[in-house]
Amino acid sequence: MNPAFQSAEQIQLPSDQNISGRTLGTEEIEMVTQALQSGTLTSTRGTFVKQFEQRFAEMMGVDHCWCASSGTAALHTAYAALDPEPGDEFVTTSITDMGALTPILYQTAVPVFADVDSDTCNVTAETIERVLSPRTKAIIVTHLFGNPCDMGPIMELARSREIPVIEDCAQAFLATQNGRLIGTFGDIGCFSLQQGKHITTGEGGMVVTNDADLSRRMFLFINKAWGYGDEKPDHYFIAPNYRMNDITGAVALAQLNKLETSVNHRVQMADLLTEKLQGIDGLKTPKISDGSVHTYWKYCLNVDGDKVPGGAVGLAKVLREDYGIFSAPRYIQKPAFQCQIFRDKVTFGKSQFPFTEARPEAVDYSPENFPGSFAGLEGILVMPWNEAYTEEHVNYIAHAIRNSLQQPGEYN
Ligand SMILES: *Cc1c(COP(=O)(O)O)cnc(C)c1O
């Protein structure tokens, strides 16, 4: 590489995979100690998960919150609350975490993929409307990277067809649109506390809702459908044990106190990076709709392969090799429907159930149906991001990106 652009020394960025990029500290240790000393580690008897559920509901301004053992479990709980018939359709996005998809199949429903806006990789009212059918049981809206989907038109569409909306907010803690918290637009909001999310307990998740019936069904689903507190309790329907334990609840409670500060800092540093990356030919900073607050689970760039040699993959290679910055071109690499589970319909034994119940159009994964998804993944470069980033880190990233792009050919 051209020595004129050599950085004096590489800076190691904080990582959300260890303590360098996480806010875990004495508060969590104190809470966990209390939980252990109480000797009650199940949330059915303990106090920590219960306190956390109450506090998170208050923070979200909703009536009900239940914890689950993961974000995947939380999403499964939300899907199960709608009690789909085999072959019912859940409209979802082609660009998401697999944990948002497999529970649809476990619940015997069929995921129907909506295309996305290639700039944000988010679904829109238009892409959703194209795949609605009389069998649509629910619409799942994923606020990718913390950038809110345009909820006005989506909710208008859903309400006009009387289809419930589940918001996947695993990447979008405290994001807002027109002053309203993401996760409170739809019927159910789902969150994750996995290692790499805004706050973490290693694994964990939550569902929130204002609907008392859905809340009741979700509580039961998490608890083997055992009617705790009922006069004549029974196991009412098929359901797993998805409970969070009280040690995890203790960590969650301590983490919750840090959420707002972490989110604000992530946003502040992201805004700074956006400022520093203005005016670079071939590079787009995050597109945020009017009235939205993006809370930056990750900071994503959009790289124009016609202007940047090697496109997102090429830029990522220089950032890694010359600057030690590990970004992720193509995010999940391919749209979800190209993963083996969907390609070969690998579900229960050799049955291919519940795909066997699906309308052929619902499982038509022809690439021409998904131009936004392919274009979006082609251009996307996901920068690592967390609440420990300082101005120095942001300067370093901006410097690395600018220098990399001033040397076309070097990384062709
Ligand atoms: C992380 C994530 C999930 C799954 O959460 P886990 O806690 O890892 O099970 C689901 N959806 C999205 C969008 C995610 O980012």
Image (cartoon, grey):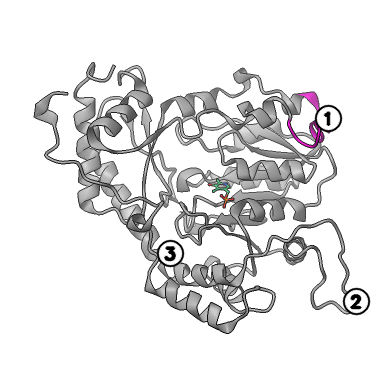
Chain-order first, disc 1 or disc 2:
2
Can you tell which quarter of the image residue 301 is in?
Answer: top left
Disc 1 marks which amino acid? Thr
Which residue in the structure is indicated by mark 1?
356
Task: Tell me if residue 132 comes above or below residue 296 in the rendering.
Answer: above
Residue range in magenta is 346-360
Q: Position of residue 53 (x, y in %)?
A: 60, 70
Can you tell which quarter of the image residue 319 is in?
Answer: top left
Element on which disc 2 rests: loop
Q: Tell whether 69 sits left or right of 364.
A: left
Chain-order first, disc 3 or disc 2:
2
Chain-order first, disc 1 or disc 3:
3
Which residue in the structure is indicated by mark 2?
232
Q: Position of residue 397 (x, y in %)?
A: 25, 41
Residue 401: in magenta span: no
User: Looking at the image, which residue is at 45% across and 30% down?
Assistant: 330
Which residue in the structure is indicated by mark 3?
259
The label nearer to you, 1 versus 3, is: 1
Q: Tell whether 123 sits left or right of 43.
A: left
User: Do we see residue 130 in this rendering?
Assistant: no
